[in-house]
Amino acid sequence: MLKTNHTAVTEFILLGLTNRVELQPVLFVVFLVTYLVTVVGNGGMILLIRSDSRLHTPMYFFLSHLSFVDLCYATNITPQMLVNFLSKRKNISITGCFMQFHFFIALAITEYYMLTAMAFDRYMAICKPLSYGIKMSRGVCISLVAISYIYGFANGLAQTILMLRLSFCGPNEINHFYCADPPLLVLACSDTYVKETAMFVVAGFNLTCSLTMILISYIFIFMAILRIHSAAGRRKAFSTCGSHLTAVTIFYGTLFCMHLRPPSEASVEEGKIIAVFYIFVSPMLNPLIYSLRNNDVKEAIRKVIQKKLFDK
């Protein structure tokens, strides 16, 4: 809908998760703890992979970059959100809002294809073990990671440019805790058809494309595992995929709910709850999922703890 007031907006007000004042300090503590666990977990995973030579394999190379993306993902949103919990005026500049918007989309799409690269790595390891070392060389791994970053940030830039073409002339209250697509489109005074169409096409294409590649990889993986005669061999093969499948289920499940809905006041309210899962819960849980379900990571953690105790 076009609005008639043409006073340019210079800042936005983030309404946050709730307008109940008594809950703000409680939510501040909850999300601060969640963020600290995310930083320690993902930062620790990156340092652990870099410090232990046994983890210098393609699978852990991709995992270190997944941890880096998760760390950036949470950091893009959480500090501003924590400040707003304790502030009376929950404002963000229009420049800051669009930067947050850009990095959110860029990092989300980067994570799609980082998870896809990890699925491809598992496919090569289980289905093509004899050529795994050649096909998944360091150069190939670096290329897959670089393509994920470049493609993700190119998509983020394109979506941000389309958003910048819209006019915002008031009201300026974003019914969310970060600068997201649907609540921003609700505030636009100009025609949002092109941006809405691009949002659905980009979100739908990248979600479907990346998830399809992951599913195809796992179809071949499961077929290969079922051909393994020993029960111990099948369990070992499944154990290398369990953590990745869990991370994929959490991340993609919430994103499908978030993006493939038309922007409206009702969808924005639902989106707040869904967004908590993929912005805060998923990045926090990923290091726990990969450390608790992975013997190599558990052994590396054990070595670090023993070394610290021995040094003392």
Image (tube, rainbow, N blue to C red):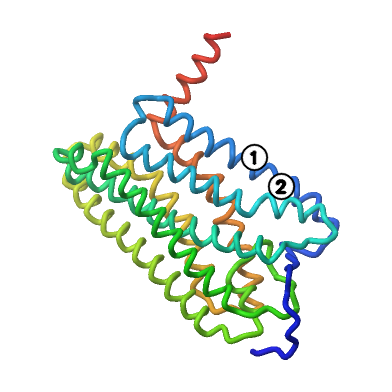
In-image side of 100 versus 121 (left or right) = right
Numbered label attached to residue 30: 2
Residue at (54% x, 48% y) in the render: 283
In-image side of 67 versus 124 (left or right) = right
Numbered label attached to residue 85: none
Residue at (62% x, 70% y) in the render: 270
| Residue 307 at x, y percent in the picture | 49, 14
User: In the rendered view, would you say 34 is above or below 261?
Assistant: above
| Image quadrant occupied by the C terminus | top right
Give the CA separation, mark 1 to mark 2.
Answer: 10 Å
Q: Secondary structure at mark 1?
A: helix
Q: Quick one: label 1 or label 2, which is nearer the N terminus?
A: 2
Characterize the local packing of mark 1: few (<14), some (14-19) or many (20 or more) Cα atoms within 10 angstroms: few
Asked whether 29 or 147 is in front, the reply is: 147
Amino acid type indicated by mark 2: Val
Q: Kindly identify which residue carries mark 1.
A: 36
